[in-house]
Amino acid sequence: MDDPEVPYLKTSAYEWTARAFEMLEAGTLTAAVFATDGIVSTRVEGPCPRCTHHLGDRQTASAVSSLLPDERGLGDATATGNVVQIDVTCACGEPHAGAPEATQSCGVSFRIELEVDGTA
């Protein structure tokens, strides 16, 4: 299923965010967000929407913004309410024609939005 012929192209065109959303709905790409003790982390796994090679992306989206219990929050990691936006760049680990030296990625970046479950 992987397409080794996809050349490197540094792009963040909306079509890749739309494709990632379709893949999330179909269950071929998975994404999760976790909030524990004021720390928000994310995980995205599955095929890259552009090259279809497997990618795994883990990020820490935020940290405690205050040590006071009533003022803990997600800071800049949320767009609205309990939604986290994750910017993912392909890091499939596979070579792509035209990629910069030592780069193993097709070059695509896309955005995923997820609801935070739990207490942040």
Image (tube, helix red, strand yellow):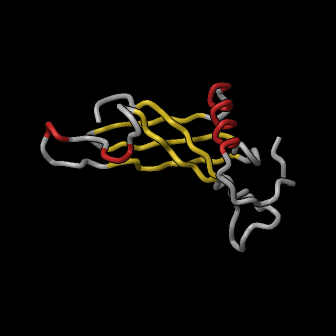
Dividing the picture into quarters, in which one does residue 71 lie?
top left
Residue under the image location 15 percent in, 48 percent down:
67
Q: Position of residue 53 (x, y in %)?
A: 74, 47
Residue 117 pos. (x, y %): 38, 28
Left or right: 18, with 95 as reference point: left
60 horizontally vs 112: left or right: left
* Residue under the image location 55 percent in, 39 percent down: 112
Between 7 and 3, the residue placed more toward the observer is 7
Q: Quadrant of residue 119?
A: top left
Residue drawn at the location 67% of the way across and 32% of the way down: 23
Is residue 47 found left or right of 78 in the rendered image?
right
Q: Is residue 14 above or below residue 83?
A: below
State which quarter of the image contains the N terminus.
top right
Quadrant location of the C terminus in the rendered image:
top left
The location of residue 52, given as percent across then percent down, is 75, 44
Most distant residue in the bottom direction: 101
Identify the residue shown where x is 36% and y is 42%: 40
Q: Position of residue 97 (x, y in %)?
A: 82, 64
